[in-house]
Amino acid sequence: MSTVLRTAVETLRDRAPRAKPQVAVVLGSGWGGLAAHVEDALHVPYTELDGFPHAGVAGHAGEVLLGRIGTREVAVLCGRKHAYEDGDVKAMKVPLLALRELGCKALVLTNAAGSLDARMAPGSLMALSDHINLPQRSPLVGESGPDRFVDMVDAYDRGLRETALAVAHRQGIELHQGVYLWCLGPQFETVAEIRMFKQFGADAVGMSTVPETILARRAGMKVLAISLMTNMAAGMSEENLSHAHTLEQAGRVTATASRLLADIIKEIAP
Ligand code: HPA
């Protein structure tokens, strides 16, 4: 374990000596409402944690919440650093490995994405069944040993996804399934790119999640990921794309999405 990782884990253990989180969660744009569902929450700012990102983008708080959702102990990362900020695809490595070290065997990733499927209008939710790593960048570059050759078949755990689909069904909320294509960003896509991505088999496009899934699979965590569609992808509607628009659209559905996510987490058996 690196010194930075060990220090971060020790700080979290000092701050919350009794915490034994089972499920780690990363909140992306539009998912901040989940924080209100965490009971007995202890807040630890990223600035107190070695190796955690110390500057984020609008819409993210930059703190870890340790607490409970139902009977599940959770560790919620409010805010992520994206590879588009400074090109670092390992930005979330220490936070994710620290939560794994604390005991999290499952990881729930959330994000905002653009929809490539006319049946998924803005406001729709999609559980990732798979991803396309378009930039072909990896947070595992530079690692050694045979474990770095991580098997990415079924990277998104079927059991966790089935639980998510069952909870959504029970609540009468449509949860789509589909393939998420990662773009480095931060610029949005061209119309020609979106046309190509459709042919590649992508259902949604976004600028996060994939490096985190790779890190989590390497660490042996099961992954569930859910996208909130904030817009139709470039060229598929009359709207202009902007980060402000993403946040505004996300804000419209954050309460429903967060409640669903809280109920899913209550049922996850890591
Ligand atoms: N493209 C990339 N990332 C996104 C989008 C998009 O259309 N919407 C929200 N995040």
Image (spheres, helix red, strand yellow):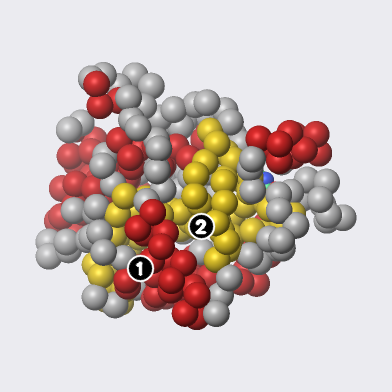
Answer with left or right where residue 269 lies relative to residue 198.
Answer: left
- How many residues crowd mark 1 within 10 Å: few (<14), some (14–19), many (20+)? many
Q: Nearer the viewer, residue 115 or 140?
A: 115
Residue at the spot 29% in from the left edge and 54% down from the top edge = 106
Find residue 121 and report its image quarter.
bottom right
Disc number placed over residue 62 in the picture, else none:
none
Query: On the rendered image, what quadrant is the N terminus found in?
Result: top left
Identify residue for label 1.
265
- Is 95 placed above or below 27 here? above
Residue at the spot 42% in from the left edge and 59% down from the top edge = 161
Q: Nearer the viewer, residue 81 or 103?
A: 103
Task: Name the N-terminal-most of marks 2 and 1.
Answer: 2
Answer with left or right where residue 185 lies relative to residue 7.
Answer: right
Identify residue for label 2.
127
Q: Label 2 to label 1, Cα distance in Å?
A: 14 Å
Q: Nearer the viewer, residue 187 or 71?
A: 71
Residue 221 % position (x, y): 28, 47
Answer with left or right where residue 231 lies relative to residue 84.
Answer: right
Residue 207 % position (x, y): 58, 42
Residue 141 % position (x, y): 38, 21
Tag 2, which secondary structure? Answer: strand
Amino acid type for the residue under numbered disc 1: Ile
